[in-house]
Every structure is written in C-alpha cells, then in structure tokens.
Image (spheres, grey):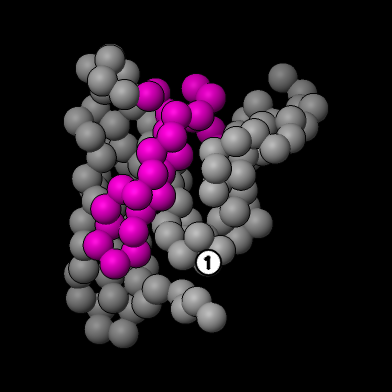
Amino acid sequence: MRLLPRLCVVAETTKPARAFDLASGKAGWVYESRPGAHLLALDFCPALDRFVALEYAYNQVARDTGPMVALLHLDPSGGAVVLREAIREWSTAVFCANGTKLLNGLGELYDTGTAAVEHVFEVPR
C-alpha cells in the first residue's frame, strides 16, 4: 500500500515550487525550473507515487535548450526530476483522474505515466 506524501507543494508562476511538511508546516525541498521555464500545473499521482507537473518554457533561451512544454515527474522525497517528456506545445492543461491523466486545451488526453496521448476529444476551437 502506498501512502500519500505528507507534503503540500506550492507552485507559483515564475517561482520555484516549494514543498511543506503538512504536520509541522516546515519548508522541505524546492524545485527550481530551468532558466526561462516555470511550472503551470502540479498534482500528486498516487499510482506513480510522484508529483506530476507541467513545465512551460516562456522564453526563447529555454525553448532553444529544451521542450516548450514538458510533463515532469518529481520525486516526493526530494523534488528531483525523475522524468521529463516533451508533449504537444499547448500550455493550457489540467491534471485529472487522480493525477494519472493530463488534458490539454486541444482535447488531447495524456497518460501521465508514459506521456503518450491516449485519446483526442473533439473540442470547439
């Protein structure tokens, strides 16, 4: 049986993500995106036992050195990136299904474990 981490992770645009211990309120680890990128969304996925995040490269320097939009897996014990996979260049997205899925504004439903598109919904544009 997996246990949810006893952490609350706060991600603010253009700021590092910060983990706080829920019992003590003390600051834990910090995840800082690569220069020119920041996290747009963050959730915990019990099935993966990891935090999942959407990282967006907002300037050309970051886009020249990595994907414009990437799905990340963060280790709950220290915030290290365990997986970084480029996904479709669309920054509006939400995590759903207990963090196992990511749905973007194009209607693409990603499996967060593999970063593969599982389904494409017809959405009005």
Query: Would you say residue 43 is visible in this rendering?
Result: yes
For label 1, the residue is 46
Residue farthest toward the right in the current orientation of the protein: 122
Q: Residue at x 55, y 43 (%)?
A: 114
- Measuring from the top left, give residue 35's x and y in whole percent: 20, 31
Q: Is residue 24 left or right of residue 11?
A: left
Magenta-highlighted residues:
67-94
Q: Is residue 81 left or right of residue 98?
A: left
Front one among 20 and 73: 73
Examine the rendered structure and indicate whether residue 6 appears above or below residue 103.
Answer: below
- Name of the residue lying farthest toward the bottom: 23
Residue 41 is left or right of residue 124, and the answer is left
Q: Quadrant of residue 98?
A: bottom right
Place of residue 113 in the rendered image (x, y in percent of width and height, measured from the top left)? 54, 49
Asked whether 91 falls inside the magenta stretch, the response is: yes
Q: Would you place residue 22 above or below residue 73 in this image?
A: below
Using the image as rendered, state which of residue 107 and residue 82 is in the foreground. 82
